[in-house]
């Protein structure tokens, strides 16, 4: 799962915008008795898919403001807001593609991508093909690369939970509470945020912001592409979306790769998954501190993990007392520094900014950690990404409503795993007072007709701990697990590791899976 810190952080996801209730129904209401017809969701998705196959996608150059130059093309797919009412209100989903580079004989259809979130946009994926990214040249000969903004995200009827200008304000409160009053203030913010989701998005749309509905949307996109089977690559939250799709539509899957895997057990979605993140983030944070200490001659931040951690605590305390540049406090620092536990490709960048700051370069820290003052409106607003994250996770599953439970669980975790625990709690606390009905998660299973799924996971992943891959592998019969031992970057398939890259190519090009699970060594560790 890709994270942004709602209520107390600058965030990291991008997408967009303001009041979405009109967008959810614009140009799409069907009047009369037909719009009121209610059917099972399985029938609703079949109706929507048949309509999408008949209509297809009218591909054209992407709108100028989207930053997607030719040869990437854009289009729209219409889906119901509520699959129980397939003739009722609809929304349009933004999709894009880059056409395969190979011959007609080499072509194997479309490869659809989801990068995670919930709240992440997949529209940048076709750029990998368009720019000739080295890792994907073989796959690009066989597949059109297709991305999309999921429902509520970016250009796809974007939802909102607060004024984007308020979201961009900084510094926000320190996520680590000093007193019970600090906790009560965060509880108030969380309840206000949940109420804002209902007010700005509307119950009709908010109640339908679920992973199963996004999986149904994915099947309609497949039909709009006029393909009988889905080829899919999902990363982070995209693995849960893929697992739910595989459960609901097992016979519609052709090839599926899930990379950095969410634990799909019903008792994990989503409260316990977030608690498990806190533990895993601490471990990966320690990995980065060990690396920084190893290169003390470069960064001068301490020659032991204890020294580096002490300097981090001193930085947080100083920024709490006097926010850097008036805008970077502990919350904004965390928004930047959490890049290191996510991706080791950022290790040198984060350490370099910190080192420069300690050497007197305040601007380096402001450039890296301060919120973007222009990120206040439009389809690039980080506020939208946070809104979708909250809406999907809160609506997908039942969350504890007892503040005593939240306080007890997070206080205990914070004692041992302080890096992310309280910020994670505040980000998810709107789910405790969620204003629309919370659903029961899909029981993820590999039903008859599902082909072999390729699962890829590093053992020290912070955002989606390794146990998620093991549990998904157990549930999806016939799947194969490729483990990157000793590594911890979130998202493995886009890294250079021949042991993994060759298996991704073999699976996508030939449908080949190893006869048994595979353990690969780690990709190269960064060097300053």
Image: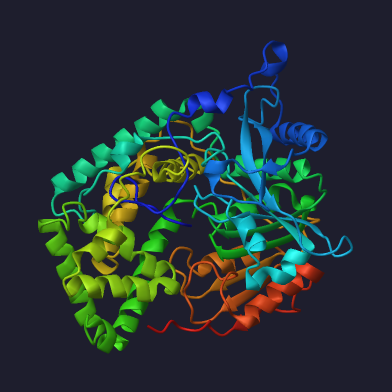
Left/right of residue 276 with respect to residue 513 in the rendered view: left
Q: Nearer the viewer, residue 112 or 183?
A: 112
Q: Quadrant of residue 164?
A: top left
Q: Nearer the viewer, residue 448 or 20?
A: 20
Is 120 placed above or below 262 here? Answer: above
Q: Nearer the viewer, residue 137 or 523?
A: 137
Left/right of residue 372 with respect to residue 245 in the rendered view: left
Image coordinates of residue 149 in percent, x first then y, are 58, 44
Q: Quadrant of residue 376?
A: top left
Q: Residue furthest right?
A: 105
Q: Quadrant of residue 195?
A: top left
Left/right of residue 57 with respect to residue 466 in the rendered view: right
Tally of numbered tags: 0
Is 470 placed above or below 335 here? Answer: below
Q: Is residue 317 visible?
A: yes
Image coordinates of residue 75 in percent, x first then y, are 68, 40
Image coordinates of residue 79 in percent, x first then y, are 67, 33
Q: Residue at x 71, y 64 (%)?
A: 453
Q: Residue furthest top?
A: 32
Q: Residue furthest left?
A: 321
Image coordinates of residue 74 in percent, x first then y, are 66, 44
Q: Residue at x 19, y 81 (%)?
A: 307
Q: Residue at x 54, y 49 (%)?
A: 67
- The C terminus lies in quadrant: bottom left
Q: Is residue 478 visible?
A: no
């Amino acid at each position: 799962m890709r994270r942004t810190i709602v209520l107390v952080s600058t965030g990291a996801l991008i997408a967009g915008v303001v009041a979405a209730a009109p967008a959810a129904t614009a140009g799409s209401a069907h009047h009369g008795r037909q719009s009121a017809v209610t059917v099972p969701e399985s029938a609703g998705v079949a109706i929507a898919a048949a309509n999408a196959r008949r209509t297809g996608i009218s591909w054209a150059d992407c709108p100028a403001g989207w930053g997607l130059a030719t040869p990437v093309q854009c289009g729209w797919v219409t889906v119901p807001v509520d699959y129980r009412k397939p003739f009722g209100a609809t929304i349009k989903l933004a999709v894009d593609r880059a056409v395969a580079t190979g011959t007609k004989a080499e072509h194997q259809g479309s490869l659809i991508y989801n990068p995670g979130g919930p709240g992440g946009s997949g529209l940048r994926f076709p750029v990998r093909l368009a720019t000739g990214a080295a890792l994907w040249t073989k796959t690009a000969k066989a597949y059109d690369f297709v991305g999309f903004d999921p429902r509520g995200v970016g250009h796809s009827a974007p939802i909102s939970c607060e004024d984007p200008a308020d979201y961009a304000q900084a510094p926000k409160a320190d996520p680590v509470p000093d007193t019970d009053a600090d906790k009560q203030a965060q509880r108030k913010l969380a309840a206000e945020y949940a109420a804002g989701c209902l007010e700005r998005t509307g119950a009709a749309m908010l109640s339908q912001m679920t992973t199963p509905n996004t999986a149904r949307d994915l099947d309609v996109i497949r039909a709009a592409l006029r393909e009988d089977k889905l080829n899919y690559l999902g990363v982070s939250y995209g693995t849960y979306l893929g697992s739910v799709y595989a459960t609901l539509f097992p016979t519609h899957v052709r090839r599926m790769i899930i990379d950095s895997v969410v634990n799909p057990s019903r008792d994990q979605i989503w409260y316990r998954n977030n608690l498990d993140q806190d533990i895993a983030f601490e471990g990966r944070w320690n990995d980065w501190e060990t690396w920084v200490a190893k290169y003390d001659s470069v960064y001068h931040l301490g020659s032991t993990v204890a020294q580096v951690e002490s300097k981090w605590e001193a930085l947080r305390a100083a920024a709490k007392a006097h926010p850097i540049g008036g805008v970077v406090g502990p919350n904004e620092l965390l928004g930047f520094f959490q890049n290191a536990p996510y991706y080791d490709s950022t290790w040198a960048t984060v350490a370099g900014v910190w080192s420069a700051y300690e050497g007197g370069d305040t601007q380096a820290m402001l450039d890296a950690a301060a919120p973007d003052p222009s990120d206040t409106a439009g389809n690039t607003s980080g506020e939208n990404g946070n809104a979708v994250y909250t809406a999907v996770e809160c609506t997908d599953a039942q969350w504890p409503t007892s503040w005593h439970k939240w306080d007890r669980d997070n206080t205990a975790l914070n004692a041992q795993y302080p890096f992310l625990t309280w910020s994670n709690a505040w980000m998810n606390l709107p789910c405790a007072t969620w204003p629309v009905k919370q659903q029961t998660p899909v029981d993820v299973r590999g039903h008859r007709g599902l082909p072999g799924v390729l699962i890829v996971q590093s053992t020290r992943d912070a955002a989606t701990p390794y146990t998620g891959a093991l549990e998904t592998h157990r549930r999806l019969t016939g799947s194969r697990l490729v483990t990157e031992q000793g590594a911890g970057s979130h998202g493995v398939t886009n890294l250079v590791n021949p042991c993994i890259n060759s298996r991704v190519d073999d699976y996508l090009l030939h449908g080949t899976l190893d006869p048994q699970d595979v353990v690969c060594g780690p990709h190269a560790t960064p060097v300053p």
